[in-house]
Image: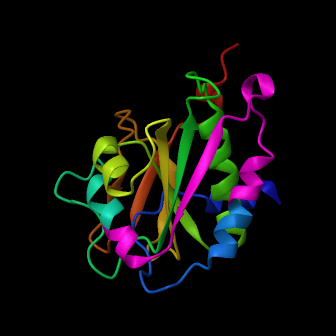
Amino acid sequence: MLQELLLKNRSYRRFEENHLIETQILKDLINLARFSPSSGNLQPLKYMISNDPVKNSLIFPNLGWARYLENWNGPSAGEKPSAYILILGDTQITNSFGCDDGIAAQNILLGAVEQGLGGCMISSIYRENIQQALQIPIRYQILLIIALGKPKEQIIIEPIPSDGNIKYWRDHNQIHHVPKRRLDDIIVS
């Protein structure tokens, strides 16, 4: 059921780093993105796969992780993603990518959950560093990076507290809590 996939599709930030994700699985996830709607049906998105530890090590230090967790600089050794999918915009097709990357990323993440994996959509990126390190041609704009792996953390969705604080947090057991608005609070009548 779709709702079950959506509830399992959280922004995972800690993974079983040694869990290999085969290249074919990553290609299958990109194939799901290929079927996403595209503004004007331009289909300007391209993808780069990384499931190699050396290539992953070039990507990881150029990502921002969980800004609300002030004293946490991202996954530690053994908890880093085992794969990445970079979503690129091909500027030879268009310079305006709208929300195509977000739609494609959601399809990829839902497919990952269906495979028993998890991921995190990351837009806090040192783009120039990654562009240079991976020798990505300048025609491709880095739009999003999806970190993927076998989740190593528990995430709980809960109502927003009475003070209205929407910041996610971790408890003393390192369980990740994510406040979400109630349905009645997001429908405007």
The magenta segment is 30-57
Q: Position of residue 2 (x, y in %)?
A: 79, 55
Q: Residue furthest bottom?
A: 18
**Residue at x 31%, y 64% (from the top left corner):** 58
Q: Is residue 9 magenta?
A: no
**Does residue 21 lie above or below 9 as drawn?**
below
- Residue 1 location, x and y as percent? 83, 60
Give the image location of residue 158, x and y in percent.
50, 52
Q: Look at the image and say whether residue 55 sits in the magenta stretch.
A: yes
How many marks the image carries: the answer is 0
Would you place residue 14 above or below residue 137 in this image? Answer: below
For this rendering, which residue is in front, 170 or 111? 111
Q: Where is the C terminus found, in terms of image quarters?
A: top right
**Residue located at (50% from left, 85% from top):** 19
- 185 above or below 60? above
Q: Quadrant of residue 17?
A: bottom left
User: Is 70 left or right of 10, judged from the image as shown?
Assistant: left
